[in-house]
């Protein structure tokens, strides 16, 4: 038996092509994160029927919702989507084409009310009905811009609906579908995107006097391979002394603000947070803090010549004179030894990454910094 309800489809667009498989993988991860953001921004009881590539088919059975309620849901998803993109754009580690292009991704939302029903295949709930087809056909239309909210006449049957926000301006349109001509109104969402507040980042200065240890080592690898080895939390068990495995990395792609928990050989668990990142063609710097401690670890990577790079690791204690004295008396000796062991372990791993990169891309890895600047907290 047919039921009536709301069909709500947010659709992402903007990626055009990808140079290599790595960039395809990063685009997939970016889209995955954005789709999860949209699902998390659902606050009117929408159900997910399925994820359709770059779009989500939401639905809710029942009477037609008030347009104000639908608008608030559109606003919530749209602003969450662009807030996520903005934060990733200024905090990302990776500078491949896919990660750079993510800032230009767009979102449109199709809303339609009609008849449809559901059926189950194992654990999946699917929708079937003429109006489900109509809603999908409306994704292809003559609207030139790529960020808008489309409302069919089934939700606004008396002509141009009242604007649920002062800035919103309606335009009329129609689409010939398999069910006949469907009239709709649409509003550009550009002003809503411009209203998303910026997310400034603060560098945070390190006082020279608070540096409690430092070590430098040169490696036969380009600075990008060295950064891949050291900057990715997922690689820590391959070289960092005492780390058995890494879990609970809270972002699909590395960025300032990401957290990773290292499980240590002695049974401890240490959680690190990325706090700063800066790049130029010959120099990369990033920093990390450890939960529960006032330590800041600064990694400085410098390109030398003929595929060689220098890594400098420095530890700062930011908790004041008492914390510095405690570190020097109780922890410094073992910290120095552990760091030296880590730097020894790093050399074969960096060589492995270098050989892998040379085999895959003639010595170039497009998935790391190539032309951008500074991020930090």
Image: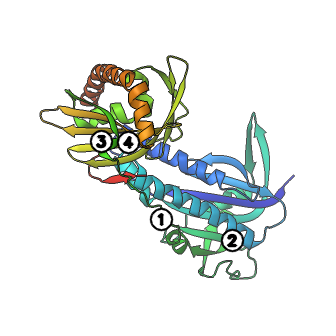
Looking at the image, residue 151 sits to the left or right of residue 328; the answer is: right
Residue drawn at 87 percent across, 52 percent down: 1
- Whichever of callouts 3 and 2 sits on the residue coming sooner in the sequence is 2
Nearer the observer, disc 3 or disc 4?
A: 4
Nearer the observer, disc 3 or disc 2?
A: 3
| Residue position for label 3 | 366
Residue 286 at x, y = what percent? 35, 42
In three-dimensional space, the C-alpha distance between marks 3 and 4, rounded to whole angstroms, equals: 23 Å
Looking at the image, residue 81 sits to the left or right of residue 336; the answer is: right
Q: Is residue 177 visible?
A: no
As drawn, which residue projects farthest toward the top? 266
Rate crowding at label 4 as few (under 14), some (14 to 19) or many (20 or more) other CA atoms within 10 Å. many
Q: Which quarter of the figure has residue 63?
A: bottom right
- Whichever of callouts 3 and 4 sits on the residue coming sooner in the sequence is 4
In three-dimensional space, the C-alpha distance between marks 2 and 4, rounded to whole angstroms, equals: 50 Å
The numbered mark at residue 198 is 1
| Residue position for label 4 | 287
Nearer the observer, disc 2 or disc 4?
A: 4
Q: Are marks 3 and 2 in contact (CB under 8 Å)?
A: no
Nearer the observer, disc 3 or disc 1?
A: 1
Residue drawn at 33 percent across, 24 percent down: 336
Nearer the observer, disc 1 or disc 4?
A: 4
Q: Are marks 1 and 2 in contact (CB under 8 Å)?
A: no
| Residue position for label 2 | 152
Rate crowding at label 2 as few (under 14), some (14 to 19) or many (20 or more) other CA atoms within 10 Å. many
Secondary structure type for disc 1? loop
Rate crowding at label 1 as few (under 14), some (14 to 19) or many (20 or more) other CA atoms within 10 Å. few
């Amino acid at each position: 038996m047919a039921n009536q309800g709301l069909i709500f489809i947010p659709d992402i667009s903007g990626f055009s092509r990808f140079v290599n498989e790595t960039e395809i993988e990063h685009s997939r991860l970016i889209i995955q994160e954005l789709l999860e953001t949209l699902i998390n921004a659902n606050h009117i009881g929408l159900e997910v029927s399925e994820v359709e590539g770059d779009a989500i088919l939401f639905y809710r059975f029942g009477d037609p919702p008030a347009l104000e309620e639908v608008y608030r849901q559109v606003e919530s998803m749209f602003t969450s989507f662009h807030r996520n993109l903005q934060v990733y754009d200024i905090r990302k580690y990776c500078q491949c084409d896919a990660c750079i292009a993510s800032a230009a991704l767009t979102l449109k939302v199709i809303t339609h009310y009609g008849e449809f029903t559901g059926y189950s295949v194992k654990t999946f709930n699917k929708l079937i009905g003429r109006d489900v087809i109509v809603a999908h056909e409306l994704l292809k239309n003559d609207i030139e811009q790529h960020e808008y909210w489309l409302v069919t006449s089934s939700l606004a049957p008396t002509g141009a609906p009242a604007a649920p926000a002062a800035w919103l301006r309606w335009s009329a349109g129609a689409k010939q579908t398999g069910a006949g001509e469907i009239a709709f109104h649409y509003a550009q969402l550009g002003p809503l995107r411009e209203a998303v507040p910026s997310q400034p980042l603060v560098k945070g200065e390190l006082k020279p006097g608070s540096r409690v240890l430092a070590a430098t080592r040169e490696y036969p690898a380009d600075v990008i391979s060295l950064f891949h080895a050291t900057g990715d939390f997922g690689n820590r068990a391959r070289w960092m002394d005492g780390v058995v495995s890494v879990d609970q990395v809270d972002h699909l792609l590395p960025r300032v603000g990401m957290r990773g928990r290292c499980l240590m050989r002695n049974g401890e668990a240490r959680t690190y947070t990325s706090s700063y990142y800066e790049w130029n063609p010959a120099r990369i710097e990033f920093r990390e803090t450890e939960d529960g401690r006032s330590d800041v670890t600064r990694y400085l990577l410098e390109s030398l010549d003929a595929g060689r790079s220098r890594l400098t690791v420095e530890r700062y204690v930011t908790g004041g004179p008492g914390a510095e004295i405690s570190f020097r008396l109780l922890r410094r000796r073992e910290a120095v030894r552990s760091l030296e062991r880590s730097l020894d372990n790093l050399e074969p791993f960096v060589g492995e990454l270098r050989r892998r990169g040379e085999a895959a891309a003639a010595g170039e890895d497009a998935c790391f910094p190539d032309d951008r600047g500074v991020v930090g907290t």
